[in-house]
Image: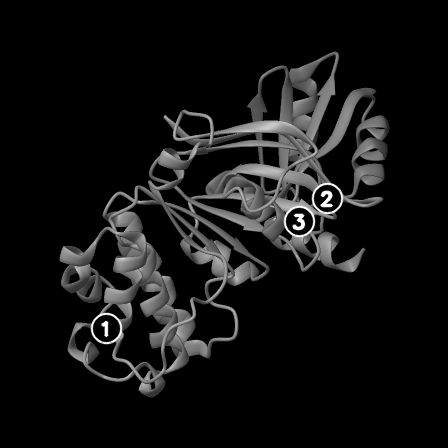
Amino acid sequence: MDVLSIKGITKYYGKICALNNVSFTIPAGSVYGILGPNGSGKTTLLGIIMNILKQNSGSFELLGESPVSHVRRRVGTLLETPNFYHYLSGEKNLRIAAAIKQKGENQIEDVLKKVDLYNRRHSKFSSYSLGMKQRLAIASCLLPDPEVLVFDEPTNGLDPVGISEIRELILSLAAQGKTIIMASHLLDEVEKVCSHVAILKYGNLLTAGKADEVLVNEDIVEVGAKNMDILENILKTFPGVSQVKKSGNFLQAFFPVGMARMEEINRFCLDNGLILNHLILKKKSLEALFLELTNN
């Protein structure tokens, strides 16, 4: 089952295209990272999903339905830090949050334990570290036990200890069956916690899929020729290739990141008497893709 299905979402701010025909699906139980630098459209996309913004065109389904209010109540959202009262304890702040939502008051003790703040529940919010404040914000999202959690830059501004705490919390919530959608500009964060990833660049979807496919640590070149057996033998002797395997009607040659030289592959095959009829760079590593994002 897909928790979220996005179909052709486009959003303009005046003449500026913030999202351009973006489409992908988020499966249930996944930790789905939406990765991109500032200005790539991540927050705009989350705002549309949560009905804060309206798209110019396209549509989406949330939990198998049109995004009506009763569906959104099944989603916990952290798009910005809640306005907690600094002079109140963490527990009292959550009681206020539950009262506003009119749900979840009987779950406060449980969510404090989930975010590892139970022993500090009576401490004033002002005494919390940045990481603890962010965990309390996530605790507020967990009232009243949503199926889906949506986070925008959940580790933004935190020190390494705080980042580690939030990372472990996200993995723990995922292990409990929550679907988590998180926007981030941090490559390391996405690599360490996400099962799936989509990469946005200036509002365009660059790639999307399972993390173990998108986050490949090699460049992959897809190659084709009239005689595939001869091609396979030639490619296996090409300098730098780590493996060659069949993929549909073509062969895939794997190289260390940045070492796939398309002109050299073509010339090498010609020198060995074989003309290629198909030669494309199929997939780059996430690091290479992210460098492409941030350098343009």
Quadrant the N terminus occupies = top left
According to the picture, the residue beneath numbered tag 2 turns out to be 260
Mark closer to the chain start, 1 or 3: 3
Outermost top residue: 226
Q: Nearer the viewer, residue 216 or 210?
A: 210
- CA gap between label 2 and label 3 equals 30 Å
**What residue is rendered at 50% in x and 63% in y?**
80
Q: What percent of the width, then of the height, locates residue 78?
A: 44, 57
Q: Nearer the viewer, residue 236 or 209?
A: 209
Mark closer to the chain start, 2 or 3: 3
Viewed as shown, does residue 116 lie left or right of 41? Answer: left
> How crowded is the residue under tag 3: few (<14 C-alpha within 10 Å), some, or many (20+)?
many
Q: What's the amino acid at mark 1?
A: Lys
Relative height, residue 167 to residue 181 (above, below): below
> Quarter-wise, where is residue 170 in the image?
bottom left
Q: What percent of the width, then of the height, locates residue 82?
A: 42, 66
> How crowded is the residue under tag 1: few (<14 C-alpha within 10 Å), some, or many (20+)?
some
Look at the image and tell me whether residue 166 can be seen: yes
* Residue 41 badge: 3
**What residue is rendered at 27% in x and 54% in y?**
143
Q: Nearer the viewer, residue 250 or 76?
A: 76
> How crowded is the residue under tag 2: few (<14 C-alpha within 10 Å), some, or many (20+)?
many
According to the picture, the residue beneath numbered tag 1 turns out to be 92
